[in-house]
Amino acid sequence: MYSNPLVVVPILFGLSMLAAVILFKFFQATAFITTKEYQVGGAIAGFVVVYLMLNSSYNTISGAKGKLAVKDEKIEQMSKELGELQEYSATHYVEGVVDPYSEKTKVILAVTETDLPINKQFRLSAPCIDPSKGRLALYILKEGGVYPYEIFPNEDMTKVNVRVPR
C-alpha cells in the first residue's frame, strides 16, 4: 500500500472528482453541507463528502496494514525467541571415554555427575545448557586425584576422550 502522500492525495482527489462528475452530471444527485463557517452545495459538496470518505477509509486501511506488519514482526521475533528457548531447554549429552579405567573413577559435569562403568564409557545429561555459547568443564575424580577436562563450544560432545594418569 502506498504511504507517500504525494501519490495518495492525487489518487483520492481524482477518484473523488470522478465520483462527483458521475453522481452530479449523469445521475443528477444533490448534496448540501452546512457548517458555521461555510455552506456548499451541488457537485462540490458531493466531492467533499466522497473525498472525506475515501481519505478516512484509506487511513483506516493503512493503519490496519501498519498494525498487521507490527504484529507479523512481533510474531517472527517471538518465534525466534521460542526457538532459542527450546534449544536452551533441550537436553544435551556429553559422552566419551576415560582411559585408563578404575573402579573408583567418577565423571562430573559442572551440573551433574556419574560413576564410571566398567566399559570406561560415560554419558551425562546436560539439561538447560547451550554448549555452543561457552565452555563446559568435566572433572574426573580418580583415587584421590581431580583431573579437569575442558570441552570447547566447537568440540563434539558425543566423542570426548579423556586421558588421565595411571
Image: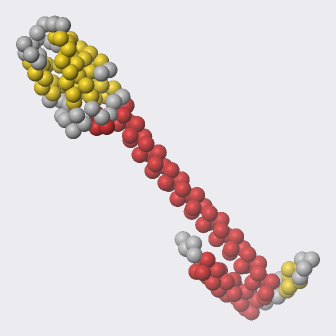
Could you tell me which residue is drawn at 42 percent across and 40 percent down?
Answer: 82
Q: Position of residue 152 (x, y in %)?
A: 22, 34
Where is residue 47, by image quadrant?
bottom right
Q: Is any atom of residue 78 visible in this view?
A: yes
Could you tell me which residue is drawn at 92 percent across and 77 percent down?
Answer: 36
Q: Is residue 101 left or right of residue 25?
A: left
Could you tell me which residue is drawn at 21 percent across and 38 percent down?
Answer: 154
Q: Is residue 75 left or right of residue 13?
A: left
Report how many numbered discs are placed on residues in the image.
0
Q: Position of residue 9 (x, y in %)?
A: 64, 80
Q: Nearer the viewer, residue 8 or 105?
A: 105
Q: Position of residue 138 (x, y in %)?
A: 23, 22
Relative vertical location of residue 94 with respect to residue 36 in this rendering, above or below: above
Where is residue 3, by image quadrant?
bottom right
Q: Is residue 106 left or right of residue 81?
A: left
Q: Nearer the viewer, residue 156 or 133?
A: 133
Q: Position of residue 162 (x, y in %)?
A: 13, 23
Residue most extreme to the right: 36
